[in-house]
Amino acid sequence: MALQKETVARRLALRVQYTDDKGAEKFRNLSFAHVAQDATDEHIYAAGKALAGLQAKPLDRVVYTDGE
């Protein structure tokens, strides 16, 4: 019997850098759920970069999870 993979949740997260009240540099994740099942990796990355352009905080990385 062949195995079948079913994706239950797809998420996009932007990891942004910020400075706390004490002047320490920290990171925060901004998550977006319900990523379209047919979105390609390139489309997801482009969307993450576009969303990051709307943020005041600098982008550290775009993270994509394809959970099961």
Image: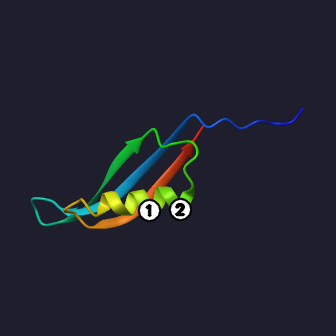
For label 2, the residue is 42
| 48 lies above or below 33 | below
Q: Is residue 4 left or right of residue 62?
A: right
Q: Which type of secondary structure does the marked residue at label 2 adopt?
A: helix
Residue 16 percent across, percent down from the top left: 29, 61
> Identity of the amino acid at label 1?
Ala
Res. 24 image quadrant: bottom left
Which residue is at 54% across, 50% downward? Answer: 39
Q: Is residue 26 left or right of residue 37?
A: left
Which residue is at 32% across, 57% downward? Answer: 51
- For label 2, the crowd category at 10 Å Cα-Cα, with few meaning under 14, some 14 to 19 and many 20 or more, is few
Residue 53 percent across, percent down from the top left: 28, 64
Q: Is residue 58 left or right of residue 63?
A: left
Res. 52 image quadrant: bottom left
Which residue is at 24% across, 59% downward? Answer: 54
Which residue is at 41% across, 57% downward? Answer: 47
Residue 45 percent across, percent down from the top left: 46, 61
Q: Are marks 1 and 2 in contact (CB under 8 Å)?
A: yes
> Identity of the amino acid at label 2?
Glu
Res. 7 image quadrant: top right
The single residue placed furthest to the right in the displayed view is: 1
Q: Quadrant of the C terminus?
A: top right
Residue 1 percent across, percent down from the top left: 90, 32
For label 1, the residue is 46
Disc 1 from disc 2: Cα separation: 6 Å
| 31 lies above or below 4 | below
